[in-house]
Amino acid sequence: MTLNLDRRTFLLGSSALSMLPFARFAFAADARENPIVAVDTDIGNLDPGNRVGTTEANILLCCCQTLVRFKPGVLDWENDAAKSIKQISDTEFEFELNPGQMFTGGYGEMTAEDVKFSFDRFINGDRDGKKLTYADDMEALKEVQVTGKYTGKLILKHPSAALWLIAMADGSGAILSKKAVEELGDKIATTLIGSGPLMLKEWRPKEQFVLAVNPDYKGPYKAHFQEIVAKIIPEHKTSFLSYQAKELDFTAFDFDQIETAKGLPDTKIIDIPGIDYTWIGINVEKGDLADIKVRQAIRWAVDVDAIIQGAYSGAVSRAKTLLAPGLLGNWADAPLYARDVEKAQALLAESGKTGLAFSFTCLNDAQSLAVAQIVQANLAEVGITININALDSGAYWALGADDASKDLELSLIPYTSKFDPSFQTQWFLSSQIGLWNWQRWSSPEFDKLHQEGLETLDKKKREEIYIKMQELLDESASCIWITHGRNLFVNASWLKPTLLPNGKDWQFEYFAKA
């Protein structure tokens, strides 16, 4: 039988994921030959399994091929490198590649051996056996069997509702050249060999990268521009000024700039409700923070509503749990912790702790610093001193490797979401301590439920599992949820950017003239 998975089990019909952006058009501006866009984070690691965030994923997905590719702007997919995929059973799939798909750099034609090699890294680790950061994306995959030059089988350990959505059609599904990886070794973090519509022509760290048409690309998704230049501008206010000066054609902008954006000529505004999650993580192993009463006191003392108003201009909704409305497993009845200074002080008194002082680590941008300063003022009122430790993006995200996060105390953490709840819950597993579980909270029950969620196909049962997991997180008092965000962009009216419904996955290969 042909592949026929339920691509929408993760949606509950909520308008929160509506792809009906507010748009304002004016007269067409003069179009450039090639667009210039702004990205807010630099390239960190171009290895699909060890990428840092969406910047790398967006590059990987236009420069590499995957077995299946998301259609423009939607969550349905179609074949990419695969000529065909057949579902034999819940745990077995046969694939056949299109012949003649060539890797850049003279690394030859893609074969089933390259598919096996690329996916085996998620199963077995890198060449030193070290687990890849995104290994859990392919948790369900048991093995890849090569049955011919262009044919093979994907054998799963168990049925999986998430594999195709968050792995095969996403950054983890990028197919690498076995020959290139074996030759380049660790250099694959900064050197991208792909077979997709675009190629990484240039990268000047902290300045820009350039995507250019891949002349050897044989697939159906022909890029519309010869080049796309991406300027690395961490602050949205700075990039928005550059857009107004017509130095850029597409950028995100901050919530307090929306009225200005509405008044710009030759401009379209894209407004996508967020499904991401920003929270304050509390290291449950660190000193006085190991006392749950201290963590509960901090949660009651922090004024999240003031953060929404002060740092986000009141333009985003408040989060109260991990999974955003509209995602499978959203815990609609999660408690909302309205600030209560008396409760916070009572809990601190019960703990017997006095003279508390903690570091608060965050990114060094205006919004993050505004959050940090509000938290600092809030906690000062209950006798807790906060020292703000603001880091540039490189140093901040480097904390996600080699147990560099072990000495963190409080952290403001902005993560992007995918469309299956298992992608969000994986970062809170015990196995992520030392990597991305900066709370260092460990729960065997949470880990067990995560596995059950991966193996369960029944939608209702999965929903119950993920709600229970969020209840456990809430009981730990290790997370103070801030917002699921909101994604605002401006683009020149001559340009048609293409984004998936989370607002963070940009499909550069589909960017076109309007």
Image: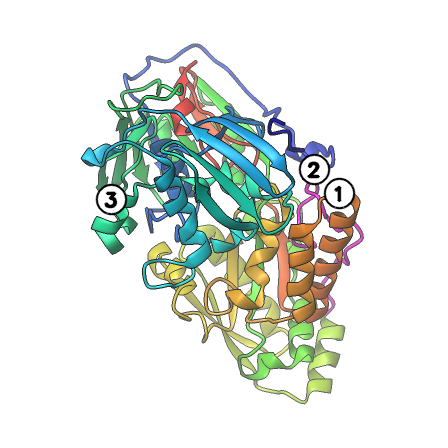
Tell which tag, 2 or 3, sits nearer the viewer.
3
The residue labelled by disc 3 is 180
**99 shown above or below 167:** above
Q: Are marks 1 and 3 in contact (CB under 8 Å)?
A: no
Give how far apart the Cα atoms at labels 1 and 3 are.
41 Å
The answer to whether residue 321 is magenta is yes
* Residue sticking out furthest to the bottom: 352
Amino acid tagged 3: Ala
Residue at image location 39% in from the left, 50% down from the top: 51
Amino acid, disc 1: Lys
| Image quadrant containing the C terminus | top left
Mark 1 or mark 3: name the one nearer the start of the chain.
Answer: 3
Image height check: is 304 above or below 477? above
What range of the chain is rendered magenta? 318-340
- Identify residue type, mark 2: Thr
**Helix, strand or loop under label 2:** loop
Picture quarter containing residue 86?
A: top right
Name the residue beneath numbered marker 1.
459
Relative to 443, is 12 on the left or the right? Answer: right
Q: Determine whether 415 is above or below 56 in the image.
A: below
Q: Residues within 10 Å of mark 1 (few under 14, many from 20)?
A: some
In this image, 161 relative to 236: left or right? right
Query: Badge 2: few (under 14), some or many (20 or more) residues near its Cα, within 10 Å?
Result: some
Q: Which residue is mark 2?
A: 9
